[in-house]
Image (cartoon, rainbow, N blue to C red):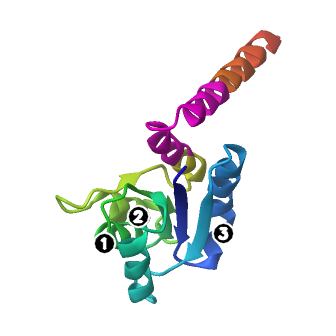
Amino acid sequence: MRKVAVIMGSDSDLPVVRKAVDTLKTLEIPYEVHIYSAHRTPAEARDFALTARENGFGVIIAAAGMAAHLAGALAANTTLPVIGIPLKSAALDGMDALLATVQMPRGIPVAAVAIDGAVNAALLAAQILAVEDKALAEKLDARRAEESEAVRKKDKALDL
């Protein structure tokens, strides 16, 4: 199975990023986590993206706030799928990061999840990998079934 790269722009992003990592662990998907900044370490970010496929990665998750150029900077240097996690910031509640993540120029796509949507980023990465991995697809199906059953139990427990 190919690995998932989880890249964050700063170690302050770790509380949100940890949710993606925990989800990947639960699904037994191999991953690596790195800190690369589109602005402070652009050469390292570029080099990572350029060699990601040959280094065994199948998907890149990029978490960044404010200007949030990380996902786009990585996507500009690879044809692997890149999933952006826009992070909430104090100034604009993450809307700045969301817009920076989704407003990519034609030819450089970046998938985006909700602000602070790390779990969905990991699940989307898993779904991409599951296109060619039946065992992983079965794990995702089982997870969905468990989540559906949990909602049904809550519904039956209502006593209003």
Which residue is at a point 50% across and 80% down the rendered structure image? Answer: 36
Q: Distance between the residues labelled 1 and 3?
A: 24 Å
Q: Give the range drawn in magenta.
A: 123-144
The number of numbered badges drawn on the structure is 3
Q: Distance between the residues labelled 2 and 1?
A: 11 Å
- Of labels 3 and 2, earlier in sequence is 3
Please state which of the two labelled residues, at mark 3 or mark 2, is closer to the viewer: 2
Q: Is mark 3 on a helix, strand or loop?
A: helix
Please tell me whether residue 124 belongs to the stretch shown in magenta: yes
Q: Quadrant of the C terminus?
A: top right
Q: Quadrant of residue 42?
A: bottom left
Residue at mark 2: 53
Residue 24, numbered label: none
Which residue is at a point 56% across and 56% down the rendered structure image? Answer: 116
> Where 123 sits versus 50, above or below?
above
Residue at mark 1: 77
